Image (spheres, grey):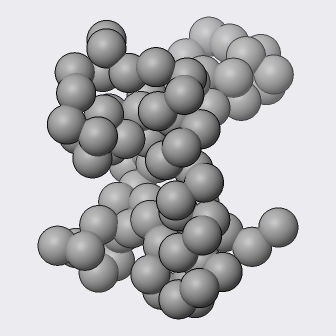
Amino acid sequence: MPLHNPMNPQGLEFLTPEESAKVDAALLSQPEKFLTRLTLSSLKLLRYIAEDEGVAIEALTHDQVIAWFERDAKRKREQGIDATVLKWDV
């Protein structure tokens, strides 16, 4: 699920190949590796949302996160997936 950045049409990667390799090399079980990848990806998305909202990540509220996801979903419904930040089909 890559992030889309208008300045980078290919989008942002949730995990770079280097980050993924480091998780793979970690002395963790498969469920722990999955949670680690999820956490690292979530951190990148929260940083993106905070920047988009114009606030420090520490000041980001759950209401702002929910509103951001709603706006992204609305863009998808109204303008198509190419207008969204998150590129996913579920």
- Where residue 64 appears, as percent x and y from the top left, is 46, 33
| Quadrant of the drawing holding the N terminus | bottom right
Query: Is residue 25 visible from the viewing direction of this image?
Result: no
Camera-nearest residue between 47 and 61: 61
Camera-nearest residue between 7 and 60: 60
Camera-nearest residue between 24 and 36: 36
Query: Is residue 45 visible from the viewing direction of this image?
Result: yes
Is residue 64 toward the left or the right of residue 47 in the image? right
Q: Is residue 48 above or below residue 24?
A: below
User: Which of the 4 quarters of the picture holds residue 37?
Assistant: top right
Q: Is residue 25 above or below residue 17?
A: above
| Quadrant of the drawing holding the C terminus | bottom right
- Where residue 24 appears, as percent x and y from the top left, is 58, 31
- Where residue 39 appears, as percent x and y from the top left, is 56, 24
- Where residue 2 appears, as percent x and y from the top left, is 49, 62
Which residue is pictured at 46% across the width and 19% down the height? 61
Which residue is pictured at 59% across the width and 38% down the height? 66
User: Which of the 4 quarters of the picture holds residue 3?
Assistant: bottom left
User: Which of the 4 quarters of the picture holds residue 9?
Assistant: bottom left
Is residue 10 toward the left or the right of residue 77 in the image? left
Which residue is pictured at 44% across the width and 81% down the height? 83
How many marks the image carries: the answer is 0
Which residue is pictured at 62% across the width and 32% down the height? 38
Is residue 86 toward the left or the right of residue 53 in the image? right
